[in-house]
Structure formats: structure tokens, C-alpha cells
Amino acid sequence: MAKYMLLLHEDKSNWQGLSAEDMQKAIEKYMAWSQKPFNIGGERLTEDTGRVMRAAPGQTPRVTDGPYSETKEVLGGFYLIEAANYDEAVARAMDHPHLEYGGTVEVREVWPE
């Protein structure tokens, strides 16, 4: 089986309107999804923008705070799953609660070992 990375992008404002009870329900849905048998692992990322390193060939890398794209979306977390192909990986990700809460799930195949 191939490995696929599910990258969870989100607009943080999607979470601001949730009550404490609704937030708890959301957390429970994420935790339940992470127990699926094809899920290898995953983590939530902190809310900071991280660091971006860029370099042209032969030049010293530049380090900047965050990607600062024009979108409000941030990379909020990731999962690593197993699937036979992209179609199966997408099908497995279709019921991820992140989609229910207005997030975006990017599916990328991991380079085979």
C-alpha cells in the first residue's frame, strides 16, 4: 500500500463561532477519525505561521516568518494514511471532519521507500 499525506488547511475564523460544547464535539470527531485502521498517524500544528526557507542554487538560504500568502488559510495539521491509490486515499478522506468544519484537505502521495 502507498502512503498519502492529508494536509489540513483551514481558515481559523471557521472555529471562532463554535460554542464550547460544539468545539468538544468537533474534537471528538477528529479523535475518532484518527482511530481509523488505515491511519498511520498525524498531528495538529501550532497556530503560528512557522518559518519558510528559500534559496536559489548556490545562494545562502533566506529565512522568513511564515508563508504570508494572500489567503487566510493556514496549514493546521496532517495525517498519514495508507491507500492503494489516489482514488482510495480521496475516498478515505471524504468523511474527515475537517471538511465538515469548512476546512480543505490536500491529498499528496508520499515518495515510496
Image (cartoon, helix red, strand yellow):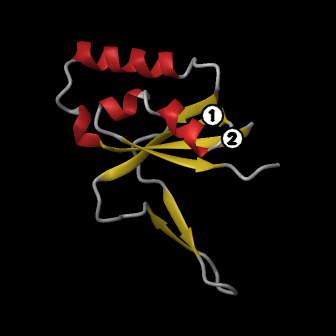
Q: Position of residue 100 (x, y in %)?
A: 31, 29
Q: Position of residue 46 (x, y in %)?
A: 45, 40
Q: Position of residue 24 (x, y in %)?
A: 33, 15
For residue 82, side relative to residue 22 (left or right):
right
Q: In which quarter of the view is residue 56 placed? A: bottom right
For the residues labelled 1 and 2, the Cα–Cα distance comes to 6 Å
Q: Which type of secondary structure does the marked residue at label 1 adopt?
A: strand
User: In the rendered picture of this protein, how many numbered marks are placed on residues?
Assistant: 2
Residue at image x 42%, y 63%?
67
Task: Look at label 2 and name its amino acid.
Answer: Lys
Q: Position of residue 15 (x, y in %)?
A: 25, 32
Most extreme residue toward the left, as rendered?
A: 17
The quarter of the rendered structure image containing the N terminus is top right
Most extreme residue toward the right, as rendered?
A: 113
The residue beneath circle 1 is: 81
Task: Look at label 1 and name its amino acid.
Answer: Ile
For residue 102, side relative to residue 77 (left or right):
left
Residue at image x 63%, y 42%?
4
User: Do the CB atoms of the residues marked 1 and 2 lie less than 8 Å apart?
Assistant: yes
Residue 8 numbered tag: none
The residue beneath circle 2 is: 3
Toward the viewer: 57 or 34? 34
Local packing at callout 2 (Cα closer than 10 Å; few below 14, some 14-19, many 20+) is: many
Toward the viewer: 84 or 106? 84
Local packing at callout 1 (Cα closer than 10 Å; few below 14, some 14-19, many 20+) is: many
Q: In which quarter of the view is residue 96 placed? A: top left
